[in-house]
Amino acid sequence: MTKGEPVDEPSAGSTLAVETRGLTKRYRGGQLAVDGLDLLVPRGSVFGFLGPNGSGKTTTIRMLMGLIEPTSGAARLLGAAMPAASRQVLPKVGALIEGPALYGFLSGRDNLVRYDAADPTADPRTRAARVGTALDRVGLTAASAKKARAYSLGMKQRLGLAAALLQPRELLILDEPTNGLDPQGMREIRTLVRELADDGITVFLSSHLLDEIEQVCTHAAVMAQGRLITQGTVADLAAGTRGRLAVTTPDTADAVRILKEYGVTDLVVAGDRITGEAPTSHLPDAEPLDLAEINAALVQTGVRVRGFGTERASLEDAFVALTGEGFDVVG
Ligand SMILES: Nc1ncnc2c1ncn2[C@@H]1O[C@H](COP(=O)(O)OP(=O)(O)OP(=O)(O)O)[C@@H](O)[C@H]1O
Ligand SMILES: [Mg+2]
């Protein structure tokens, strides 16, 4: 290994920020945690790594970061093989894995100073500025003098993120970054992730919350029991399922009749709520049926319409359609 700048810049040339081939981890106890994973994370994406508890997300992330050895298969980060290229690649990768290691007796700010000081490439003269900027970015400036042991879970999570952001990064790998945060804190992290993405940083984040992935990610992979079920753009994954038409009315019998006339199929009545598949919504080239027409017809027939609209097709629908199950922990 030669010193100085590597001649073969590992991050150049690859359009993939993360790539795995048959990545597999069997723990010593025999548990097959990750099973033949082929993951393709485009550069510039906000990539959601989705799966229920125990599906292998953290195990995968540990292998990506070179923290544990795969049983078989290979992983590349920013175009370079891991863990062989760790020394060149990891400085460009910020990571937050299952709660950061913090010194409780130090303030938030001093924890960051320690992280920064542990980085041999970090110039001590600009340390205070880097730490200040990172604190600011995660909204911890006001709480920066407080001891880390007095931080809430959400504040600790933010401090961990600040540590990952001390240096300019090409890739951020965040393991459940909103775990333990209140709704406001989750929103703030989502906003931060979007800002980082706007700066051109690829963000790979794991979550067991479908809704969160839908709100912030451009791409996603779905894991279940160590296996990849699907991956692609969030739009494509959600497009696999159509939104259903939903009508709320006390006059369900009349409403069902009108809806049938308009070609709505698969009608389900539950109390005062009717749902069904709106016609043509799955035919991209067809003239889309104006749903307002159906609404008007209902009203003209004397049906008292209290609610009318389409349920959004969600990743959750896609997940259920893919696995035939709910989003529960299995085994
Ligand atoms: N060190 C370990 N030794 C043995 N088995 C492990 C170890 N770490 C994880 N496992 C097992 O591997 C499987 C995957 O765990 P992992 O932590 O990767 O899941 P996860 O998707 O991150 O879950 P969560 O959403 O709860 O964080 C689980 O069945 C878990 O019990
Ligand atoms: Mg985990």
Image (tube, helix red, strand yellow):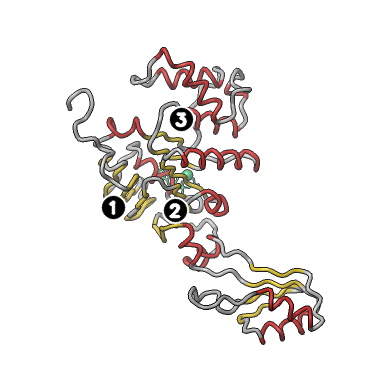
Residue 173 lies in quadrant: top left
Indicate yes or no: mark 1 CB to ligand 1 under 8 Å.
no
Where does residue 230 sit, x and y in percent of width and height?
41, 60
Give x and y (percent) for residue 330: 50, 58
State how many labels appear.
3
- Judged by depth in the image, the label closer to the viewer, 1 or 2, is 2
Residue at 41% x, 58% y: name it: 232
User: Is residue 244 shown above or below 162?
Assistant: below
Local packing at callout 1 (Cα closer than 10 Å; few below 14, some 14-19, many 20+) is some
Q: Measuring 48% from the left and 68% from the top, which residue is drawn there?
A: 240
Q: Residue furthest front?
A: 287
Between 85 and 223, the one nearer to me in the picture: 85
**Do the numbered discs 1 and 2 sit on residues whose CB atoms are within 8 Å?**
no
Q: Residue flagged by tag 1: what amino acid is it?
A: Arg
The alpha-carbon separation of the residues under discs 1 and 3 comes to: 28 Å
Does residue 55 lie above or below 278 as drawn?
above
